[in-house]
């Protein structure tokens, strides 16, 4: 049967009427209802909506209501995961946000926290294929590639022995830019000039540490090194260090004091850290001097030490050290070693860098969001004995109450009581609460409210290290912690901590409500 072709004028298509439109909309809504209720699409859209709420800052009232419910324990819905690209997110070290800030003195690479209303209310997800980390001490030499699938350092620095990809692992041969043959042989060379192995040195600071093989290798010498580097082009170098079980923190020496008290470190090390020590009238060298104990050692490897086309920078570095009466112990190739004087600085009244001693009003141990000072810390500003060679050697110094305990009234008595209390509590944690302290399951520990470091001291025989945090608004007892041969930082717990996600095996806190209160005030901040 043939088709009949009518002329256009004879065609009479059905015209859509209002009733037809309403009927179509109704059936469409019914179909959408069934899709949302009876298919995974509905769950996915609901999750996306909740996540948008958690990430949104457009409705502060709704956000504050949600926060209040969470704090009261009345928010019964699971907290959503952040987007997949947030696996390494650190709120106060966000390159996208900080890139808009000033480059002067590396201000943009320092810590800059967003306003509270812009903090995402979601949980940082793990990487795809994340596994329980390799346990200590094997982790010193290898970690799972899937836990940190960042190949940039391995590709760029593998030939220098930093790290390499090998099957499902990243392996760490122990090398570095200035010690491609390994940190062990490099440390042996330093041992020709520095008392590495006799308990004289205990606390070390490694600036611009890479993946922290220097600090990791010093652990066998009972030297506890805190390694730091900024979040920079070497993506996640501090995260690699922490995954290996090596003490490390994200920091940048820029416009602010580093968050440590005066005279904390027995040795400070810079291996091609590229810190311009003599810039800005030697401001960075002065900060290193604030942190280094009298009688301590400063080691710099790489530029500008006997480096091509950096004769002036090398001459300036030596000149600053001479002005502060540092003794040049040795220059071995591109490595220079100085020893800081024990007595008050012999700083001359007139010098080419315009350096002068800080006045008596300066508290050299105050270091939370405190701008760098261009004056030299007086050794007499810290009461009591704190010089290398005059304080007890390790491990005796762990148990002896240092003079800095007197920052608190009846400090020595409080120190003794605190030590006994934590010995009892740690035994309770292990024997009654069955925490896996002392086993390979726990390596990296944070104590959020450390006081004198008694909790960390009670764990000294276990294969762990503890980041002792002293809240910035409390009495400055962090100097006591360093005098004992332990490590830590200042921090304000109303802000995020400067570390990557998934870097601690155990987080410990006592007096948690006090962390957000100013001394003497009952109202929470």
Image (cartoon, grey):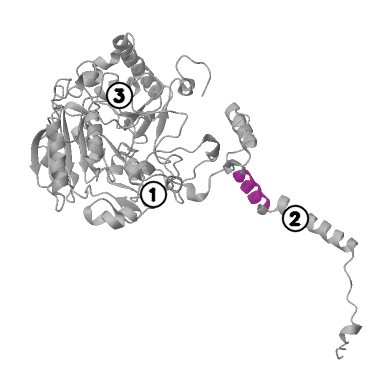
Q: Quadrant of residue 468?
A: top left
Q: Is residue 49 magenta?
A: yes
**Drawn side of residue 230 relative to residue 37, left or right:** left
Identify the residue shown where x is 23% and y is 57%: 159
Looking at the rendering, the stretch of residues picked out in magenta corresponds to 42-52
Q: Marks 3 and 1: in contact by CB < 8 Å?
A: no
Q: Which numbered marker is on residue 365?
A: 3
* Mark 2 vs mark 3, CA separation in Å: 64 Å
* Mark 1 vs mark 3, CA separation in Å: 36 Å
Identify the residue shown where x is 28% and y is 40%: 137
Secondary structure at badge 1 equals loop
Identify the residue shown where x is 87% and y is 84%: 8
Q: Earlier in the sequence, mark 2 or mark 3?
A: 2
Q: Is residue 416 magenta?
A: no
Q: Which class describes the residues within 10 Å of circle 2: few (<14), some (14-19), or many (20+)?
A: few
Percent coordinates x, y for residue 480 in the rendering: 28, 20
Percent coordinates x, y for residue 197 in the rendering: 14, 32
**Drawn side of residue 387 relative to residue 331, left or right:** right
Percent coordinates x, y for residue 364 in the rendering: 28, 24
Quarter of the image containing the N terminus? bottom right
- Name the residue carrying label 2: 32
Secondary structure at badge 2 equals helix
Q: Earlier in the sequence, mark 1 or mark 3?
A: 1
Q: Which class describes the residues within 10 Å of circle 3: few (<14), some (14-19), or many (20+)?
A: many
- Name the residue carrying label 1: 148
* Mark 2 vs mark 1, CA separation in Å: 41 Å
Q: Earlier in the sequence, mark 2 or mark 1?
A: 2
């Amino acid at each position: 049967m043939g088709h009949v072709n009518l002329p256009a004028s004879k065609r009479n298509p059905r015209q859509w009427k209002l009733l037809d439109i309403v009927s179509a909309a109704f059936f469409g809504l019914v179909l959408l209802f069934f899709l949302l209720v009876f298919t995974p699409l509905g769950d996915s859209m609901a999750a996306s909506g909740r996540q948008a709420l958690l990430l949104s800052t457009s409705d502060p009232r709704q956000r504050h209501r949600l926060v209040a419910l969470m704090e009261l324990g009345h928010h019964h819905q699971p907290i959503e995961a952040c987007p997949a690209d947030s696996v390494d997110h650190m709120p106060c070290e966000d390159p996208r946000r900080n890139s808009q800030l000033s480059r002067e003195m590396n201000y943009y690479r320092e810590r800059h926290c967003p306003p509270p209303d812009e903090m995402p209310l979601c949980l940082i997800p793990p990487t795809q294929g994340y596994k329980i980390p390799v346990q200590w001490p094997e982790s010193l030499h290898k970690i799972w590639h899937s836990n940190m699938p960042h190949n940039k350092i391995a590709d760029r620095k593998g030939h220098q022995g930093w790290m390499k990809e090998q099957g499902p692992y990243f392996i760490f041969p122990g090398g570095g830019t200035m010690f491609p043959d390994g940190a062990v042989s490099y440390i042996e060379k330093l041992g020709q000039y520095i008392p590495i192995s006799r308990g004289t040195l205990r606390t070390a600071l490694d600036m611009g540490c890479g993946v922290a093989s220097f600090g990791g290798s010093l652990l066998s010498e009972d030297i506890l090194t805190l390694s730091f580097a900024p979040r920079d082009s070497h993506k996640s170098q501090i995260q690699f260090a922490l995954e290996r079980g090596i003490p490390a923190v994200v920091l940048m020496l820029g416009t602010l004091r580093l968050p440590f008290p005066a005279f904390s470190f027995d040795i400070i090390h810079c291996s091609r850290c590229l810190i311009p020590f003599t810039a800005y009238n030697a401001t960075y060298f002065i900060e290193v001097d604030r942190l280094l104990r009298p009688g301590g050692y400063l080691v710099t490897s790489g530029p500008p030490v006997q480096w091509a086309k950096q004769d002036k920078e090398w001459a300036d570095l030596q000149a600053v050290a001479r002005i502060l009466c540092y003794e040049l112990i040795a220059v071995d190739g591109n490595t220079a070693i100085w020893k800081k004087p024990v007595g008050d600085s012999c700083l001359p009244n007139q010098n080419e860098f315009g350096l002068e001693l800080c006045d008596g009003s300066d508290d050299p141990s105050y270091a939370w969001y405190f701008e760098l000072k261009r004056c030299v810390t007086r050794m007499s500003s810290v009461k009591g004995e704190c010089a290398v060679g005059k304080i007890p050697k390790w491990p005796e110094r762990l148990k002896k109450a240092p003079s800095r305990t007197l920052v608190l009234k009846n400090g020595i008595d409080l120190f003794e009581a605190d030590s006994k209390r934590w010995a009892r509590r740690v035994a309770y944690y292990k024997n009654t609460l069955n925490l896996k302290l002392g086993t390979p399951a726990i390596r990296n520990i944070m104590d959020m409210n450390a006081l004198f470091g008694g909790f960390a001291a009670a764990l000294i025989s276990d294969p762990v290290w503890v980041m002792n945090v002293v809240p910035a608004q409390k009495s400055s007892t962090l100097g006591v912690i360093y005098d004992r041969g332990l490590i830590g930082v200042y921090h304000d717990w109303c802000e995020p901590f400067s570390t990557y996600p998934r870097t601690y095996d155990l987080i410990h806190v006592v007096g948690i409500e006090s962390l957000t209160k100013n001394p003497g005030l009952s109202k929470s901040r």
